Amino acid sequence: MEQFISSFPQQWQEIISLLLGPVGWIPRLQYVLLDFFLHSPSPWVAAAKYVLLLFPALLGLAALWCTQLSIYTVPFRNGRVHFVSALLLTWWDAARAVWLYWTGLIRFVGVALGWIVIVATFLVKLVVEAARKVSLAPFTVTGRMARRYFQPGVPWVAFVALMFWCVLEATVFTHVLFPTVTDVLSRLAETPEPARVTGAVLFVFLMLLVMGSFACAQALVDAIRTRQMKYVGQMIAVEIFVAFFEVMFLYREIVAAFMPSLADQQAGTLVVATCGWLGVRGMTWFLFGQYGAAPLMAFMSRRPLLSAEGVQLAATAAATPAWWEGPLRDFRRETEWLHAASDRLLDYLALPVLHVAAAAVNFAMVLVASRPVFNLPFKALDEIPESRTLLSGLHLQPRKS
């Protein structure tokens, strides 16, 4: 400032010094504040200065410049009392803005720390719950399977056991009948060796025969249960032919292989084969066949499985909600909460700085238009008016003489 005054002629220096007296000391104050912020003993002290004192210091400088410059305009203003009142109230708003800035920082830090603690607690609970779920997963799965098993529904255990028995019986029959079948096919085709797929085709054929045997037994039981006597007679005749076919072509070969002493006695072989067929079919039927044959027929016909009372067993499974609906609903709720929390955090972070900036703008508007433009304090970011609204409300028009 002294260099600026010394640039004028000697006779004008005293007048210029007198005219610049109200604002001449402000640049020296700015140099002091600049030195205060640029020189700090440690980075932590510098960070504390910038966070706690930089914006209040800038607001103070703006307030001093506007207040001291307004001294030059007082002699030429109309409504000086109103202007001075507005200027004093603007200083009051500036002091309150500085206080709200500091309290807003404290609130922001407290809320941020609280959310960090909450999120950390949630993560710890999530990890603990996940570890607990993983450790209890075997017991939960076995308990759920036990509950589903003992509740009415599709008898999957019997169905799987029936399929396993059909595969086992078809495998045994294939092994026993393979030499005879290959010999017959070789003589029919007049080739020394049978085809490579003979074993696979024979296995599939015998597998279908065994499954058909259980299906016939299930059809006979259904006919007896529904008391359709004509259909019962037909199914008894079909079952007799099925038993005759399996005894003559399947079980007789097994008896001949396991009991060579009866190979020459056709009557004894047939009796033992018939007893074996009755015993095997009876044991398998009463153990799992009567429960697994119905799901097998429903699966083959692509029809819903019905209980003895005619109730659809798969209806209970369709009524239960999908497993992903619960986590998806929780994810949507957490996403909405995160959006609301981010909006509140933005308010806590922006409002302290905006209070200081609005107070500085109020000083400038009092200097220019003799009235503040913002009503402090702001409760939320939505209360801050847009620039167009502020300009339309000022109505700055030149005064007509």
Image (cartoon, rainbow, N blue to C red):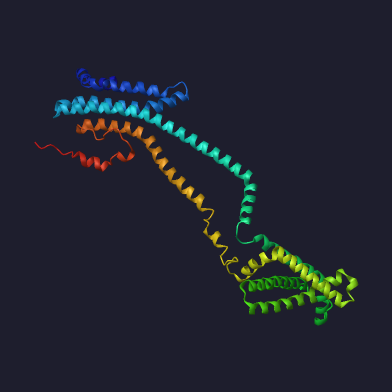
Relative depth, front residue between 275 and 303: 275
The image quarter containing residue 394 is top left
Q: Can residue 58 be seen in this view?
A: no
Which quadrant is the N terminus positioned in?
A: top left
Residue furthest to the left in view is 401
Relative depth, front residue between 31 and 129: 129
Residue at image location 64% in from the left, 78% down from the top: 229
Q: Position of residue 24 (x, y in %)?
A: 26, 21
Classify residue 138 as left or right of residue 50: right
The image quarter containing residue 93 is top left
Q: Is residue 387 visible?
A: yes
Q: Where is residue 16 in the image (x, y as percent from the top left)?
A: 21, 21
Which quadrant is the C terminus positioned in?
A: top left
Classify residue 242 as left or right of residue 54: right
Location of residue 132 with respect to 114 vertically, above or below: below
The image quarter containing residue 371 is top left
Q: Position of residue 168 (x, y in %)?
A: 76, 65
Instruction: Count how many numbered circles sit on residues in the image.
Output: 0
Residue at image location 17% in from the left, 26% down from the top: 74
Residue at image location 46% in from the left, 36% down from the top: 115
Location of residue 377 with respect to 172 vertically, above or below: above
